[in-house]
Image: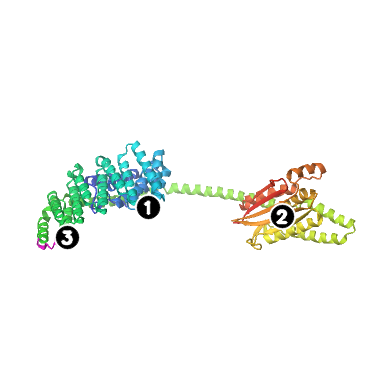
Amino acid sequence: MLTVGNFFMAQDSVKVSQVLKSAAKLKKAVDKNDDKGAADVYVNMGTDYYNQGNYPKSEEYFAKAKALYQKLNDKKNLESVTRKLAQSQEKQNKITPALNNYSRAAQMSYSEKSKAVNTNDVTRLSSPTPELRAEAIQSNIDLSKKENEKANVAEGYTQLADLNIQQKDIYKAEENLNNAYKISKKEAPQQALAINQKLADLYVENKNFDKAIEAKKKVLKEDFVKDNSQEKVNQIQELADIYIKKNDPKEAVDLLKNAYGIALDKGHTLEAQRSVKKLDSLYAISGNTDASVQLYRDFLGKLPDLVSKDRSLVDHKILEDTEQRISQLEKEKELKDELIRKKNVFNYGLIGVLILLTGLIVFIFRTLKKVQIKNKKIALQSLRREMNPHFIFNSLNSVNHFIATNNELEANQYLTKFSKLMRGVMENSTNDFIPFQQELDLLQNYLALEKTRFADKFDYEIDVDENLNTHHLQVPGMLVQPFLENAIWHGLRYRTEKGFLKLSFEKNDGDLKIMIEDNGIGIEESKKQKTQHQKTREGRGMKNTVERIQLLNDLYKKNITCSVKDKENGNGVVVTIQINLV
């Protein structure tokens, strides 16, 4: 809802003329359904509140402006108001939302300078070390000096002073606050007043009352205080508070009487009331009841005349009426929007048809995708069912060799193991993944067969990580077997001495790491041996495996990787396979 009222509820409210001007512009923007105009007014109102130190109200209006700029997709103004919103939140010690908005402003920045300033503010609020915070603040001061942005320079010095105070470097804090005050008093009086108050509070906190009094007397001599009777009364009251803390009630009473007289003369009801309350407290402490009674009688007697002179009360009524008018305009705007929505039903219908068409296209696309996936699964199944002819041929040759040598027992044992392995392969040929224990059994059976065939060529070892759940873990079936076959037939078989083959399964974070390590003749030497003995064949087993890995990654996103390389000493090959278990 558009709101304008309650402008005078805060102690340091914005000037009435500024508020009325903003209210008139806002009413005009609402009447014309001008979201951009309304957003701009919100920014002006938020800025007025921010300059007066009413940060909750400034946050409220900056947030409204931000919502409208987002609606309009006005990125340039959105960046600016997001930063202003962050500044208002920071002043209220809302660090987390302030950080978020500084970060967003940095991301939306249209210039390197703007991006750097917002990024520095993120560092200033989030950095764990004072050195980094100070570096970020100094960087913003330097950037603001280049652009001659004096108010921002003063703000930077104030932030440095806050950091000095945290580090208990009072001398440096005093120096930075004085620098900030000198810069701001000509350009931004309200900022100068806030800096002066921070400086006075610093002195009071460190029991340096004389310097605090000096700082307040200094600001009372400034034109922007002397020419503003309301602010002058406020500053005199602040000075009186310092004398009270100094335990000098006599001087405090004189100052408060002076503030009371100015407030009565200039028609500042709230300021006069505040002076009366402070004086009453001092009289109560000293036991001067008569003076307190006389003070209240005087105030009550002059109150009617004071109220009649206080223009702010009249303006407050005007602002309440303006707020009601804006509320009415907003309701009218809602009615207009409803009419527009009804007129756009046809357009929405067209949009609905387009959405349906889009949905149909998406459905067709998904159907094609499913067909593609199905084809991949068929291809994967075909690859799984391809038994390596080389393995079968050599197995049958081994049986033939056992029979030819009248070794019927070996032939029978070999055939039993071979048939068991073939049965396991065929049973699992319909599944993309099988239990790890089944795969382990198949590999153990296969290695036992090859050991029977090449008993004098190699020994082997299988090492399984005890952290692996062998019964519930699912892995691709017979993915490892071609690598074992390569290690035996192209590496270990050509050794002059007995070799060794190690197969290990290890759980590595969220992956299953499989390593096949042999001390055979190596890849390069194997290539030479192939040519020399002419015992080569087209590597269908390895090609099959590579294709299977690619299809498994496409279908199941398992991120299976495979690495085959010679050992560093050239004595054997290491194969590493990693399968994502998540």
**Residue 332 seen in the current view:** no
Q: Nearer the viewer, mark 2 or mark 1?
A: 2
Q: Is residue 266 left or right of residue 457?
A: left
Percent from the top left, x then y, of residue 560? 64, 51
Q: Position of residue 59 (x, y in %)?
A: 33, 50
Can residue 208 be seen? yes
Of callouts 3 and 1, which one flags the residue occurring earlier in the amino acid sequence?
Answer: 1
- Graded by Cα atoms within 10 Å as few (under 14), some (14 to 19) or many (20 or more), the crowding at tag 3 reads few
Quarter of the image with the C terminus is bottom right
First in sequence: mark 3 vs mark 2: 3
* Mark carried by residue 95: 1
Q: Secondary structure at mark 1?
A: helix
Residue 252 lies in the magenta stretch: no
Query: Disc 3 on helix, strand or loop?
Result: helix
Q: Is residue 284 magenta?
A: yes
State which region is magenta.
283-290
What residue sits right under mark 3 in the picture? 281
Q: Is the C-beta separation of discs 2 and 1 under 8 Å? A: no
Q: Amino acid at mark 2?
A: Lys
Q: Which residue is mark 2?
A: 502
Give, as a three-letter code, the residue at label 1: Ile
